[in-house]
Image (spheres, rainbow, N blue to C red):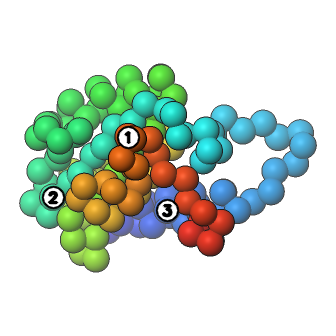
Amino acid sequence: MTRRLFLAIFAIGAGLASCRKRSPHEQSTAQPLEEWKDSPVAKVWVTKSGVIELNGVNVSIETVRATLTDLAKRKGVLIYGRQAPQEPPHSNGMAVMEIAAANRMPIRLTTKRDFSDAVGADGKIIIPTESESR
């Protein structure tokens, strides 16, 4: 229950933060969406049973932790999706999101197993149009 609440608050907070206007005196360390386009990317898919795939390879949560920590240092982006998103996430899915949040990584969510709604054929992150981002 606590993890679900954390994820809900995290998702709502991320959405609200992107809508909030910043004063000229505030500095943000977050990258605007356009700047993600050429960033290094890790693609993570979590199955209903908790199997974690990182860039198409089954891995442990420890491997995910090491990879995302390194990727965050290189200003990388996590593209994350999971099977059966209408159901509560497996604890491994929650762990991936917690690792990304702890590393303050930008996260792009995907609903498709092939990541096609987040990454284009050229391997670069798809930037949504104005109507898609509302």
In the rendered image, which residue does mark 1 sit on? 123
Residue 11 lies, with reference to residue 28, above or below; the image says below
Q: Position of residue 110 (x, y in %)?
A: 36, 59
Q: Residue furthest right?
A: 24
Side (left or right) of 74 relative to 129: left
- Residue at figure coordinates x 38%, y 60% from the top left: 117
- Residue at figure coordinates x 70%, y 62% from the top left: 19
Amino acid type indicated by mark 2? Thr
Q: Can residue 24 be seen in this view?
A: yes
Q: How many angstroms separate mark 1 from mark 2 (CA)? A: 23 Å
- Residue at figure coordinates x 23%, y 59% from the top left: 113
Q: Closest to the observer: 59 or 134? A: 134
User: Reading the chain from its start, which is encountered first: label 1 or label 2?
Assistant: 2
Q: Quadrant of residue 18?
A: bottom right
Q: Can residue 97 be seen in this view?
A: no
Which SS class for mark 1?
A: loop
Residue 47 - label: 2
Amino acid type indicated by mark 1? Gly
- Depth check, mark 1 against mark 2: the one in front is 1
Residue 122 lies, with reference to residue 18, above or below; the image says above
- The answer to whether marks 1 and 2 mark residues whose Cβ atoms lie closer than 8 Å is no
Q: Where is residue 128 in the image (x, y as percent from the top left)?
A: 55, 60
- Depth check, mark 2 against mark 3: the one in front is 2
In the rendered image, which residue does mark 3 sit on? 11
Quarter of the picture containing the C terminus is bottom right
User: Reading the chain from its start, which is encountered first: label 2 or label 3?
Assistant: 3
Q: Position of residue 93 (x, y in %)?
A: 26, 54
What crowding class fits label 1: few (fewer than 14 Cα within 10 Å), some (14-19), or many (20 or more)? few
Q: Quadrant of residue 21?
A: bottom right
User: Reading the chain from its start, which is encountered first: label 1 or label 3?
Assistant: 3
Which SS class for mark 3?
A: helix
